[in-house]
């Protein structure tokens, strides 16, 4: 049971815009920044979005993040087949005194 | 370029211990913190603990306290994680992941992962 809640799956067709939600509480998302990770099968996660909405160098601007209250969202516009991966949200939790993760969302490009 | 290179796969029997390594390069080692995060087959990410690479101080997730020990060797820029009293549920891929500060969930670089299989 993950502390942050994500839908287990999401899908879209090439060119579409897809959003993935991440729900938390006042002790994590409500008071700390959210980060998003992309993971392909058999590989390590990669930082996709940090500090709610900042893209590390090299991440396409098709990926964007937002946060409101105790929830956050990752949006992928102009969906491409290579975006098919697992996506995880993460935030620091003041009560647990550590980082917490969502359970992950498997994105399928139809 | 920043690289975190982990040791190879391990197969252990229940009750045994395993010690993994993570060698860092391409940045000033002691300027960051390092987490160990694990991922059981088909499951999500779970943090195990963090080590301050400058002071060596550690903080472990409650679930692993008493079973996990994290250390570092500044002379070789290597971080170690030892997990004892292994159970089948410890079968997972273990990652080291760098963060810029103690209270951060922004893991900007990850090792390639080490598969630990616990089986009799």
Image: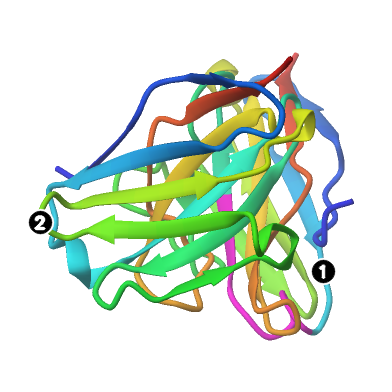
Q: Nearer the viewer, residue A80 or B3?
A: B3
Residue drawn where x is 24% and y is 74% of the image: B54
Q: Is residue B24 above or below residue B66?
A: above
User: Which corner quadrant holds the N terminus of chain B?
Assistant: top left
Depth check: give the residue in front, A7 or B110.
Answer: B110
Q: Which residue shows up at 66% across the image and 54% down it?
A: A89
- Residue A91 in percent (x, y) is at 64, 67
Kind of element beneath mark 2: loop
Task: Give the chain of mark 2.
Answer: B
Q: Residue farthest to the front?
A: B15
Quadrant including the C terminus of chain B: top right
Establish if A79 lies above or below A21: above
Q: Quadrant of residue B90?
A: top right
- Main secondary-structure element of the magenta-colored stretch: loop
User: Which residue is denoted by mark 1 in the rendering?
Assistant: A24
| Residue B75 image label | 2
Q: Which residues are magenta?
A: A27-36
Element marked by disc 1: loop
Who's the residue at 84% across and 32% down the image? Answer: A9
Residue drawn at (35%, 29%) of the image: B7
Query: For residue A60, what is the image quadrant?
Result: top left
Residue B71, x across and y down, in percent: 36, 59
Q: Residues within 10 Å of mark 2 (few under 14, many from 20)?
A: few
């Amino acid at each position: 049971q993950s502390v942050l809640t994500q839908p287990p799956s999401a899908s879209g067709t090439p060119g579409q815009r897809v959003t993935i939600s991440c729900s938390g509480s006042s002790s994590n998302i409500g008071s700390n920044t959210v980060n998003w990770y992309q993971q392909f099968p058999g590989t390590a996660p990669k930082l996709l979005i940090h500090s709610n909405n900042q893209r590390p160098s090299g991440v396409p601007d098709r990926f964007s993040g937002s946060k409101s209250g105790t929830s956050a969202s990752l949006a992928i516009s102009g969906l491409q087949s290579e975006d098919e991966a697992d996506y995880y949200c993460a935030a620091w939790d003041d009560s647990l005194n550590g980082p917490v993760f969502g359970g992950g969302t498997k994105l399928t490009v139809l | 370029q920043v690289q975190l290179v982990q040791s190879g796969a391990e197969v252990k029997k229940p009750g045994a211990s395993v010690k993994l390594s993570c060698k860092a390069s391409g940045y000033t080692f002691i300027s960051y913190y390092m987490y160990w995060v694990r991922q059981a087959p088909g499951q999500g990410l779970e943090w195990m603990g963090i080590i301050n690479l400058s002071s060596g101080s550690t903080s472990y997730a409650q679930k692993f306290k008493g079973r996990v020990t994290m250390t570092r060797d500044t002379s070789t820029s290597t971080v170690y994680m030892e997990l004892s009293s292994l159970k089948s549920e410890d079968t997972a891929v273990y990652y080291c992941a760098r963060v810029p500060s103690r209270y951060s969930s922004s893991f900007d670089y990850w090792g390639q992962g080490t598969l630990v299989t616990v089986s009799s």
